[in-house]
Image (spheres, rainbow, N blue to C red):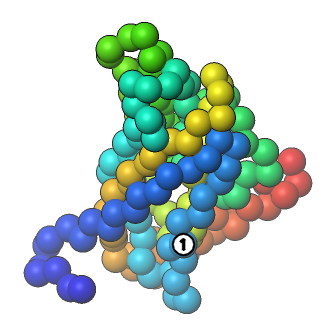
Amino acid sequence: MECYEGATMIKTFRGLIADGSQDTIVLHTNDGSTGYRIVKFEVIANQPGVVSQESVLKIYKVAQTAVDGLIDFSDNTLMASAIWFNKSSVDFPVSEQIIFDNEIFNQDIYITHSEVDASESCNYYIELEQIKLDLSENTVATLKDIRNIARTATG
């Protein structure tokens, strides 16, 4: 699908992710000329208001070997984080998202979910702005991804 000149193409993804799980959003292309930027990341419980839930969802540039509820902004592979907090006895749930929207990537991304209270699932909704990358932008994005994968593999 093509947009008229100057229009922004938005791709959306949604899913229900279980506690302790990791979902993959497949974005890579053969030539790497399509880049993305996260513009929206929203979360909501599978059963809001029914069960107590404390969920942490995160979006990473690289696959994670372990899923946890810790949020570390010094991790250069972290691109977004969100929390969903609701007690069944309280009428006002809390949801907060933080997106590092200056990150442009051209490879797959990974969503993790960690539930503190129980083993409840959580819904997520992501909007990505699609960006046409020129050769130098493509090279920079790809090299960053390779460096991040190498760092993750070596610890």
Q: Please determine whether, in this image, residue 136 is positioned above or below residue 147.
A: below
- Number of marks present in the image shown: 1
Q: Is residue 35 left or right of residue 145?
A: left
Residue 150: x and y, percent?
79, 61
Q: Is residue 33 left or right of residue 107?
A: left
Element marked by disc 1: loop
Q: Residue at x 71, y 35 (%)?
A: 68
Residue, far bottom: 30
Q: Residue at x 38, y 51 (%)?
A: 125
Q: Residue at x 55, y 31 (%)?
A: 55
Residue 145: x and y, percent?
63, 64
Nearest the eye: 43 or 58:
43
Residue, far top: 89
Q: Is residue 104 left or right of residue 140?
A: left
Residue 6: x and y, percent?
13, 73
**Residue 9 shows up from this direction:** yes
The image quadrant of residue 20 is top right
Q: Is residue 114 left or right of residue 7?
A: right
Q: Amino acid at mark 1?
A: Val
Q: Please determine whether, in this image, residue 87 is positioned above or below residue 149.
A: above
Residue 101: x and y, percent?
38, 47
- The residue to which callout 1 is attached is 26
Q: Residue at x 33, y 48 (%)?
A: 40
Q: Please determine whether, in this image, residue 128 is positioned above or below residue 18.
A: below
